[in-house]
Amino acid sequence: MTIIQHLIDAVSAGGIYALAALGIGVIFGIMGLLNFAHGNFIMVGAYFIFLMSGRPIFIVIAMTVVVVILLALSTDRFVFRPLRGAEAATLLIASFAVGYLLENIILVIFGGRPKTVDFGHGLVESVTIGSVRISQLDIFTIAMTVVLLIGLTLFLRKTRYGLEMRAAASDFRMARLLGIQANRVVATAFAVSGVLAAAVSIMLVARTGAVSHGMGLMPLLFGFLATLIGGLGNLPGAALAGFILGFASVGFQVVLPPDLVPYRDAFLFALVVIIFALFPGGLMLGLRRQGGERV
C-alpha cells in the first residue's frame, strides 16, 4: 500500500510540473518565446489567494483564475505586442524584466517574509479507499490536473480559437496569410497560459499553506526543464516530461539513502542531463525516430 501512496504523490507532483510546462510551452509554440515571467504569474496568483483567504474556496479559485488571466493578457498587450517581430533575445529580456517588476511590486506591498494562508484547510483530511488512505489534497490536485489536461485538449482540437492556435504553432506566417489574426492568437495563448499558471498557484498554496515572493521559481524551473525534455513547442511531450519529473522526484525521495535525500535535486538534474544526452531533440522526437527506425 505504501507503493500506491508513492504513486499518488508522484502523479500529484507530476501534474504540477506538467501544467507549468504547458503554460510555458503554449507561449513558445506560438511566439518562440520562453516566458520567464510565467513563474511570477504563479507568484501573483498565490498572493491573490492570500488576499482572498477566508472566503469560500470556489470563489477564491474563480477569482484567482480571472486575475492571472488579466495579468497575462495585460503583459501581452503592453509588453509583448509592441515587440511583435523583435528578435528572440529581445523578447527573452522583456520577459525577465516583467518577472523582475512583478516580484519587486510584491516585495514592496507584502515584504520579503513568507506568509501563511488559510486556504484549503479542509483538504488536509484523508479518505479511505479499501485499505489505502489518500489525502484529499492529492485527490484535489490530480482531479484538477485531469480536468485541465482534458479541457486543454478539447479546446485545442474542438474550438475555433484552439484550431487557430494549432495552425499558428505549426506555421505562424502561413496562418497569418490565411487570415488568422496574430494578435488574437497570441492573446488566446496568453490567456491559456494564465489559466495554467493560476492552477499551479492554487495547487502550490493548497499544498504548502504559505506564499513567498520566490515561490514561482521551482515550478518555473521544472516546467522549463519539462518543456525542453518534451521538445520545444511539443505540448504532449511537455506534459509527459512533467509527469516523468514528478515520478523521478518522488522516486529519488523514496529510494535514496537518508544521507543522500537532501541531494535529491542533484540526482534529478543528473537524470535530466542523461535524458538530454539520449534525446537531444526532445523526448517525443527521439521516441518517434526510434519507432521509425524499428519500422
Image (spheres, rainbow, N blue to C red):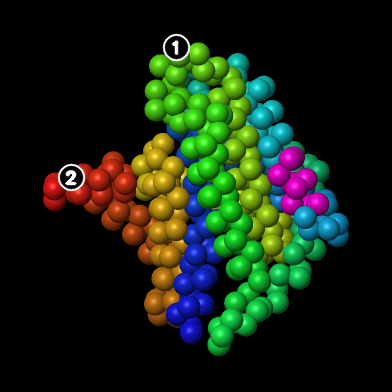
Residue 57 magenta-highlighted: no
Of residue 131 and residue 284, the one placed in the foreground of this image is: 131
Q: Residue at x 49, y 52 (%)?
A: 18
Q: Residue at x 46, y 62 (%)?
A: 246
From the top left corner, tell me how far across and down residue 81 is, in percent.
60, 19
**Taking 91 as reference, is 27 above or below it?**
below
Query: Looking at the image, which residue sits at the far bottom?
Result: 131
In the image, taking residue 84 as reference, residue 76 lies left or right, namely right
Q: Which contiguous range is marked in magenta?
A: 59-67
Element at label 1: helix
From the top left corner, tell me how far across and down residue 12 is, in percent.
54, 64
Q: Main secondary structure of the magenta part?
A: helix
Of residue 280 and residue 100, the one placed in the foreground of this image is: 280
**What kind of residue is marked 1?**
Leu
Disc number at residue 177?
Answer: 1
Q: Is residue 221 visible?
A: no
Q: Residue at x 57, y 56 (%)?
A: 145
10 Å crowding of disc 2: few (<14), some (14-19), many (20+): few
**What kind of residue is marked 2?**
Gly
Q: Which residue is mark 2?
A: 292
Q: Residue at x 71, y 51 (%)?
A: 46
In the image, taking residue 248 as reference, residue 108 lies left or right, namely right
Q: Disc count in the image?
A: 2
